[in-house]
Image: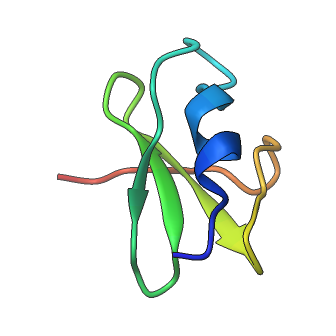
Amino acid sequence: MDLDPALRSILGCPHCKGPLEPHEGPPPELHCARCQRAWPVEQGVPQLVSERERPLTP
């Protein structure tokens, strides 16, 4: 995943403020283990808006 390490270190879940973990995909995403939600990363830019989130399924 093409995500800047400095950016990744300061990002948190928009809902619970928990840590976000990268997942290579496809498509590349950031996952929140606490909320069980995912957001896409497009060209190195996380799309952390509610319109782009999806629930993680077990």
- 18 vs 47, left or right, is left
Residue shown at the point (78%, 56%) measured from the top left: 47
Q: Nearer the viewer, residue 51 or 25?
A: 25
Residue that appears at 34% across and 22% down: 34
Question: How is the rendered protein coloured?
Answer: rainbow
Q: Residue furthest front?
A: 6
User: What x and y, as percent, mark residue 3?
Assistant: 63, 64
How many numbered dots are placed on residues in this image? 0
Residue in the foreground of this view, choosing between 3 and 12:
3
Q: Is residue 49 left or right of residue 36?
A: right
Is 45 on the left-hand or right-hand side of 14?
Answer: right
58 or 34, nearer to the observer: 34
Report the side of 43 relative to 31 (left or right): right
Residue at 51 percent of width and 75 percent of height: 1
Looking at this rendering, what residue extends furthest in the top direction?
16
Name the residue furthest bottom: 26
User: Residue 54, relative to residue 14: is it above or below?
Assistant: below
Whether 13 is drawn above or below 51: the answer is above
Residue 30 on image: x %, y % = 51, 53
User: Which residue lies at the image location 58% right of the left edge and 13% below the top edge?
Assistant: 17
